[in-house]
Image: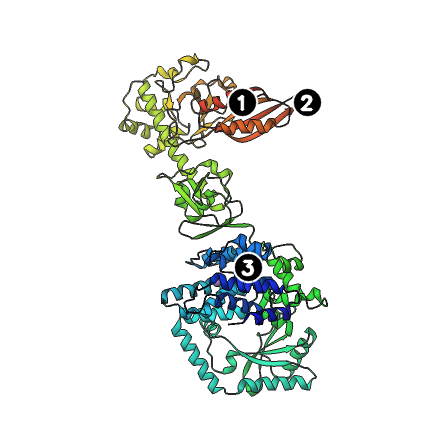
Amino acid sequence: MIRQYELVETVKGYDPNANESLLNRAYVFSMKAHGSQTRASGDPYFSHPLEVAGILTDMRLDSNTIITALLHDVVEDTGTTTEEIEELFGPEIAKLVDGVTKLSKIEIQTESERQAENFRKFLIAVSDDIRVLLVKLADRLHNMRTIHHIKKPEKRSRIAMETMDIYAPLAERMGMRKLKDELEDISFQQVNPEAYDTILSRLEFLREKGEGIAEEISKGINNALKENGIEAEVFGREKTPYSIWSKMERNHIDFEELADIIAFRVIVDDVDTCYKALGVIHKNWPMVPDRFDDYISTPKRNGYQSIHTAVIGPRQVRIEVQIRTQQMHNISENGVASHWQYKTGGDKNEGVQYKWIRDLLEILDQASTPEEFLEHTKLDMFQDQVFCFTPKGELISLPLGSSVVDFAYAVHTEIGDTCVGGKVNGRPVPLRYQLHNGDQVDIVRSKVRRPSPKWESFVLTGKARSSIRRFRRQQQRGEFEQLGKTLLERAFSREKLDFNEEALELAIKALKFSSLEDLYLDVGRGMTSDQRVLTAVYPGVKFKNLQKARPEPIADWDLYEDDHEHAIPIKGLTPGLAVHLADCCHPVSGDRILGIRVKGEGIMVHTMDCDQLLEQTDDPDRWMDLSWQSYGEEPEFYTGRLELIVVNEAGALANIAQITANHGGNISNLKMPTRDPEFFTMIVDVEVRDSKHLKGIITALRALKVISSANRM
Ligand code: MN
């Protein structure tokens, strides 16, 4: 275990601005807070945060990161609150500790590649500060180093899989190769111990066989460079068992010689010398074609820079050589973490120095200066996405602004088709509710599949949109058939004839339909009139009573009953499919209505007093008597349109919105066609349950001081 003064001295050694007393306070605070807790190894728990801090001091991270490492488990595992941390260590550290605590609470299940990718993105999206991720990775590294103390093999392998799927790739993306290699290697050993042992014994064999070869080759290269006046550090680095294994799996490569598993590194002072060294190496040994890469002029996306080449080197063996500067080397080892080292290292060459950070920023899709990135590193990566959980903890990623319906369709088409409501974090929300990062979404479903065409106005994802449309087309067909059947039933009963499907066989034949469904569909769509069907069944009979089907538009309204004798019930039909609620008069349930048949589209529903009807009097055969008959099984909403004349004064609109909301109405659209100094006209669409509901709202609005008049349009 590192001692307190050692830790403080180390940090002070590379960070002259380190807050010594705060470091000391964090050390003592964490030790006391964890008290007598122990690790699986039997060690005092405090050894863990201390080791995590140690890993991060090796990367020379700033003192606030080190303090966060010391404190990273106190909120999660002891009685300490975030408020206490803030009081003792200030807001910045409190925020960092809180960030790490949040990450620890995320339960990760990786059932697929896609899942793992989503989780990595999620971790990044919820980490405001890149230092949170650095502490989390160091935390994971120490837990992996001590994983052998965990007794249950299933638990070990679960943690190892998670490390392999989530944290190692995350480290790689952040350019932290050293950490990534170690995480992968320990995980590999846990997940596939046989393979690990196989590679290890192969390595052992090659090492014995190639005794001294690595030193000999390094020396050979170094001498050649010296002869040309180049000072360099040359050494061979053995690949890790896991990287050998995965290369074998990927490329079916054999490893015959030690040189096959050692990459030689040539570290020089500056970029210029890198290219000079390359020249010397290619001059002395034949180059292997197709193995040359210049990542200095074109760095990798995570900032990695180096020249890669392969030659038939000393002792006539094929070797891989990587040429780089010391700084490139540090970055290749520690990636994101290493730029703290260069922050205080002077200003020379700053443009080049931070170039890779800028490249990283580009990936992060964020426009801020590298300096900001260093100081605050707001990670805006994946900010165009939102990550939510199913109740089972599966992670679903959606475009930002997605609704509960998008979520339901993302889980499964069937779930989307049957969703009627949602609960977010246990709280009921409307279907159009926009999801936030980390929301747990529970979909409330009905037994029937019934996506509403209205959802199209707020869904974002293509899957939801196309599913709704596809369903709508299917359903429309079904509703046309239902409507067609109802129309024929009514026509038969009007004529006091028995309605039966056998009788309709005659019509199917005479009118050349292929099935009963097709006949219903055609009648429902208004392509074939009921009179034509009647005549086909009873050729030669004259039907006199047709007139009765037509209601009088200017009837005595007080005699109106919703389920009068010949009215066609539109119960169960969805607005927008076979029946359409007219835009001119916005009928709502409970209104006195009648329908106009529109060829190919079904029935347009108008209120009995709609002005539009007067323009259609020349074709009375298309009119029909309709009734709602407790229209719809589930609570439906209708849009009523109001015209308000409003006194032009401050707060009028707020007043109107308030009263409407108080009465359970929802304003879905609002227009102000005219406005003068004293009054303005407002057209308001209000979603209501039925005409009674709408009347209630109108009455309440009329009672307002700012309302001069309120009427349905
Ligand atoms: Mn921990």
**Count of residue discs:** 3
Q: Is the residue at mark 3 in contact range of ligand 1, meaning its CB lies under 8 Å from it?
A: no
**Residue 114 visible to the viewer:** no
Q: Is residue 18 left or right of residue 242?
A: right
The residue depicted at 67 percent of the width and 82 percent of the height is 231
Badge 1 or badge 2: first in the primary sequence: 2
Q: CA distance from mark 1 to mark 3?
A: 53 Å
The disc label shown at residue 677, or none: 2
Mark 1, residues whose alpha carbon is within 10 Å: few (<14), some, or many (≥20)? many
Q: Is residue 379 above or below residue 651?
A: below
Residue 401, how many percent across, how many down?
Answer: 53, 44
The residue where tag 1 is placed is: 701
Q: Is residue 109 visible?
A: yes
In the rendered image, which quarter is residue 488 located in?
Answer: top left
Residue 560 vs 160, above or below: the answer is above
Tell me the amino acid under the disc marked 1. Leu
For label 1, the SS is helix
Asked if disc 3 and disc 2 are in contact, CB closer than 8 Å, the reply is no
Which one is in front in this view, the residue at disc 1 or the one at disc 3?
3
Q: Which label lies toward us, 3 or 2?
A: 3
Closer to the camera in the image, 560 or 594:
560
Residue indicated by mark 3? 132
Which residue is painted at 46% across and 43% down in the image?
A: 404
**Which mark sits nearer the N-terminus, 3 or 2?**
3
Image height of 451 relative to 713, above or below: below
Label 1 to label 2: alpha-carbon separation:
21 Å
Q: Mark 3 is on which residue type?
A: Val
